[in-house]
Image (cartoon, grey):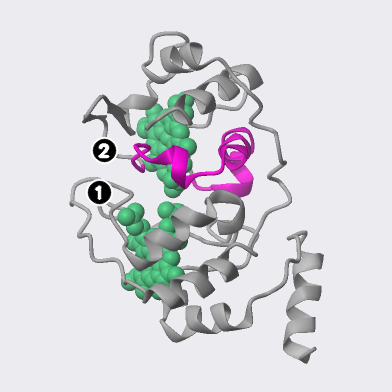
Amino acid sequence: MRLATTVSMAAAVLLGVSAGQVNASGEKLFTDNNCNGCHYTQGPAREKTIDDQLAKKGPELWYAGSKFQQAWLQGWLADPKPIRPLKYNSLTEKNPADHPKLAAADAGAVTDYLMTLTSSEVVKGAAGKGNKMKGKMLFMGKKPKMPCKACHQYPKKKKVLGGLSGPSLVDANKRLNPDWIYAYMMKPKVFKPIKMMPVFTGVLSKKHVQNVITYIGSFK
Ligand code: HEC
Ligand code: HEC
């Protein structure tokens, strides 16, 4: 084993990040394609102030393997489509839809690498099985009054409705790991110390969160 690999795996263990098999070629492709110019890949969260957040050119990827579903990630890297309706860190400009694209073969290797970047704060099975109808009431801001839809797009039959300030949740059932959503909503400080989304801990119960995740997971 190369020394660099040994060191980075030891560092991963020290950081509490589960040390998967680091995919060297995917990691190299990530640097070669300058992905690290806009994304950081080592936790814990580095942004401490609003200015830190605004200085970032793209979302942090240090927990990508816990956040994303592998098949979606591979497809998206080869053919990226806007996730946030608005430009990153903007509340007025439209998403320019200009994310760098990887060749299909490289997308697989980079995905394998990104899937090794996990957070031990994400617990398998945590999202549980909630009540979809109750989750829908919550999402729509009926009961309790938490209008997720004010900031997130969601599908209704063939239409897309909802607000633009947060990432679209239209394909969240294929894109996101429900157990990551649970950890993200219950432990905001770990994943997003600088809040762009309201904090729901202490406001929503564990059951509320499981219900809304079950609703989001039902999007087709
Ligand atoms: C010029 C800056 C820039 C570069 C270079 C770049 N990205 Fe991105 N990346 C972004 C932005 C901005 C977004 C948010 C896009 C959106 O919401 O539609 C993003 C989103 C992503 C996402 C989804 C993250 C999330 O939390 O929604 C992944 C995965 C990703 N990029 C991987 C890569 C990889 C792999 C490369 C190298 C091939 C790369 N990026 C190169 C700026 C960049
Ligand atoms: C005031 C606007 C606002 C409200 C209300 C809101 N969100 Fe968000 N949400 C955001 C923003 C902005 C982000 C992106 C945060 C970031 O990357 O810093 C986000 C991120 C998310 C994500 C992660 C998406 C991704 O791709 O990274 C999920 C899941 C989510 N919100 C679910 C919810 C749910 C469920 C509710 C209702 C209980 C809700 N949000 C209410 C603005 C909002």
Q: Position of residue 156 (x, y in %)?
A: 27, 24
* Quarter occupied by the C terminus: top left
For residue 175, side relative to residue 90 (left or right):
right
Query: Residue farthest to the bottom?
Result: 2
Q: Label 2 is placed on what type of residue?
A: Leu
Mark 1 neighbour class, 10 Å CA radius: few under 14, some 14 to 19, many 20 or more: many
Q: Quadrant of ligand 2?
A: top left
Please tell me whether residue 163 is drawn above or below residue 90 in the rendered image. above
Q: Quick check: marks 2 and 1 in contact, CB under 8 Å?
A: yes
Report which residue position mark 1 lands on: 86
Mark 2 neighbour class, 10 Å CA radius: few under 14, some 14 to 19, many 20 or more: some
Ranked by sequence position, the earlier of labels 2 and 1 is 1
Q: Is residue 149 magenta?
A: no
Residue 206 seen in the figure: yes
Q: Which residues are magenta?
A: 167-194
Residue 197 seen in the figure: no
For residue 57, side relative to residue 63 (left or right):
left
Q: Secondary structure at mark 2?
A: loop
Query: Residue farthest to the top?
Result: 143
Report which residue position mark 2 lands on: 164
Residue found 31% across the figure and 26% down from its top: 150
Residue found 45% across the figure and 86% down from its top: 32
Query: Any atom of ligand 1 within 8 Å of the CB at mark 1?
Result: no
**Residue 180 figure quarter:** top right
